Amino acid sequence: MRSRTSFFNRTVFWNDLRRWWPLTAGYALLWLLILPLTRLTEYGRSYGVPSAWNMKLDTLGIAAVGGYWSAFCAGILFAMAAFSYLTSPRATNGAHALSARRETLFVSHWLAGLCAQLAVQVVVVLLTALVLASRGAFDPRVTGLMLLGLALPTVFFYSFGVLCMVFTGQILAAPVFYGVLNVLVVGVELLVKTFAGNFLYGWAEPQAASLTPLSPIVQLVSVNVRAVGTGNEYYDTGTVSGVRMTGEPVIQGLGWLWAYAAVGVVLAALALLVYRRRHSEATGSIVAIGWARPIFQYGVAFCAALALGQLIYYIFFGQYRANGSFSLAGSLACMAFAGLIGFFAAEMLLKKSFRVWRSGWKGALAVTAALVALGVVLSLDLTGYESYVPDVDAVESVQIDCNVYHTNASVYYTATDADAIRLVTAVHRAVIADKARQQGVERYGENDALTSGSFFTVNYRLKNGDTFRRRYSPVTLYRDEENAPGTPTAALSALYNDPDVALMRTLGRWGAKEDPRTLTDLRFTGGYCGISRWKDSYYQGETQNDLSPTEAKQLYDAVLRDAAAGHAFGSLFEAREDSLTVELYATYLDTRDYSGSTEPVWGEDGRAQAVYDLVITPRMTETLAALRAIGVDADFG
Amino acid sequence: MIEVKQLVKTFDGFPALAGADVTVPKGAIYGLVGPNGAGKTTLLRCLTGVYRPDGGSVAIDGEGVWENPAVKTRVASIPDDWYYFSQSNLADMARYYQGFYPQFDTARYERLKAVFALDEKQPIRRMSKGMQKQAAFWLAMSCMPDYLILDEPVDGLDPVMRRQVWGLIMQDVAERGTTVLVSSHNLRELEDVCDHVGILNKGTVLLERSLSELQDNTVKMQIVFDGEPPALPEELRVLHRSAVGRVHTVILRGKQAEIEARLAAFRPVYLEAVPLTLEEIFIYELGGADYAVKDIIL
């Protein structure tokens, strides 16, 4: 007779709770100190007692932030307590010889660990609610949110800890796996980007979805889970002013907590499946699941190559990096060395023996071959990443962002018509063609009279919907090549002096996002004009003038006239006068479709704001005349 | 009845069990013997549902054991490394066992206090190895199992307690029809209690018979010849022969009467069949399987 499947065994559950009472008691004591006891002390004093609203916000904040950090720490501890029997052969055999199915044992142990934490949380939250009630600040909604702030991350981190426990047969390996896996993706992403940044000419971080959510604790920190008010208000007491939170306190990032809790349930189910497949004899192994062993071994080798390999390279060879470029062969050699260390270390852990050289040579060869292959792919640009520049016909728009360091000449422009796109792609091609020389430039010996550093970033949007970015930094520009066709300097100079580009860069970085001539119902609302005064290189203050809407419009029209007359043209190496600041403020009717977008519509009347931070050169006579007409004498002398 | 058929279990490619066949009749006391590393403990762990077999089947009364609580409820086992919770005492463990064995007999547990002179409140970890073994027996016997699986069960027990424990087991077999499978290296002891024996070597069962059948089928003869001993006919299956002075000891496979008749034809001065111990059967059977006792001179 086969017994029917039961997922719960009362004996296992209560036995667990009885055995770990010190852990549960410690957890309870910690939370009693963090919430009800400190709140009682804080709010029980006779002076400086915060308002009921602030009490609720503070208390919820402690629950929210403390909730996920304590869940992170307690999760693995309770998982280790619940499933510690899987790390001792005697205990494993004893448990598995009893008349309970694997799923019964798993669910009973899992529930025991979860219930121990949840029970403590319920008690702590109720006691905290009592403290708040005694101060007239009780709010059932805040009480519920506190419980969610504690319980939701607990479900996730505890289940994650349990998954780590069922994957290993060594008690000390579980917290290591748990800690590493909580930050692994972010760490590997960072290392890969560092590597790509060093060895892929033109590497720019792709604007893909972030992988940070796969590193849970990092994600919760980065979304800044905390208590906030649902609204803001400006206050001014006469001596102090600022913006303060109002409205009902809520947990910022609660959606992430719910999402992680749901993932936690999935991880628990996954842990159950793994547990059912796990062999009792795997107890004592670093990785208890057969198929996960090669993943572990090659994963360790990969991470060691990326982290330790690059570190070794920087420590031992970094000081020779005088010209800003890295040696791919040297770096890969260090990575191969570190990868082999990682591979054999993992082999030693798996085999529990130091004699792994003979058994592991094939895998070691594979690791080395993979890194050599990576070197070949990168040096020959087999992926085409470095040399790719799309055809003009294939580009819908391309945004260029470029700045010449020594003169502060900059181009921030979005090209949408074929001629402008052709100018941008010409710069892009010229920079790629100049790769060898650019990587060989001795940066420390740069002479700004002859050359200038620059960065150059392009964001392409193709007609097929694809997007991609490239960033080159630094790009050295040569003063004597402004008229030498095919050079980056000449190509950038041509772009710099394109009439549209010249107008847009004259209107400054903020205004250059969109061509003001295409905006609907552009209305100037005012402006600002400041002239910094200097004496013997010491700043002496600034003469400030507010501009009326009419004056702002007059200046804008003058800029347009200068641009049309070619007065905005110039050399990349021409110094800019930075002592003069002119800003024009305007609004326009925003006709863009924001449906399905998270970007807010500026203003309730559908009007968006524009700020033009004018870049004025001595040749812009119309603009300078307009400035003089409104009483601003800009002396470039 | 316990039926193990073609059981295979490998560890990282090493075959601990390579097609073992074991049949333990209901109500029998079955002694599982074999050299170190033969696969005895692995077999017992497969029988108790600890290890998942890689091949073959393990069944009790026709039902598979793996992940079958209904069957496992009827089986109590005492492994060589019996597990208890480190902070628990006997009373705690008794409560724990009650959660898995619905037939746990509290009255019997109380009665067994008279047999096992242990302090119920003393933490088990503070008990000696022998006392821990007694505790394991106390709990196992209180579970009222239909099947008792024992791995080196009396190892660590003093002679008096050994006798007590075996007495309890025999009583259960006689009164309740309990089936016992016991693995031990103490062949002398097994000989006294077992009615069936299986010899396991290198993951397979070399032979499996009732003890009487086994003893009937192997004969130890002591022979004295007048002068040089004659060459024995090849059809006599000699497992071992040795001589001290003129007394020749020959162990042969076959029926005693038939062998005596064949040897009498050589007109020996003295011919007598000597009772064969289980230990001798074990040694000489394994000798045929390349596991002979080596004469070591250092």
Image (cartoon, rainbow, N blue to C red):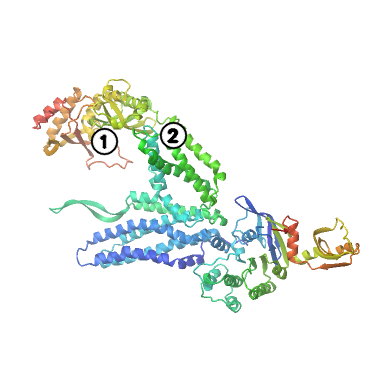
Q: CA distance from mark 2 to mark 1?
A: 53 Å
Residue B279 quadrant: bottom right
Is residue A459 positioned above or below A4 on the image?
above
Same subunit, tags 2 and 1: yes
Task: Tell me, yes or no, whether the two marked residues, 2 and 1, touch with CB atoms within 8 Å.
Answer: no
Counting from the top left corner in percent of width and height, residue B18 is at 67, 53
Residue B156 quadrant: bottom right
> Closer to the camera: disc 2 or disc 1?
2
Is residue B266 positioned above or below A572 on the image?
below
Mark with earlier residue (2, 1): 2
Residue in view at x 41 percent, y 62 percent: A117
Q: Nearer the viewer, residue B28 or B229?
A: B229
> Can you tell which mark lies on residue A591?
1
Q: Residue type at mark 2?
A: Ala
Is residue A383 positioned above or below B12 on the image?
above
How many other residues sit within 10 Å of disc 1, few (<14), some (14-19) or many (≥20)? few
**What residue is disc 2 on?**
A329
Residue B26 shown left or right of residue A352 in the figure:
right
Is residue A330 positioned above or below A253 on the image?
above
Q: Quadrant of the N terminus of chain A?
A: bottom right
Q: Nearer the viewer, residue A158 or A322?
A: A322
Query: Which chain is mark 1 on?
Result: A
Q: Residue type at mark 1?
A: Thr
Disc 1 is placed on an element classified as loop
Residue A413 seen in the current view: no
Disc 2 is placed on an element classified as helix
Residue in view at x 71 percent, y 60 percent: B199
Q: Nearer the viewer, residue A32 or A288?
A: A288
Counting from the top left corner in percent of width and height, residue B157 is at 62, 72
Residue in view at x 87 percent, y 67 percent: B270
Counting from the top left corner in percent of width and height, residue A69 is at 36, 56
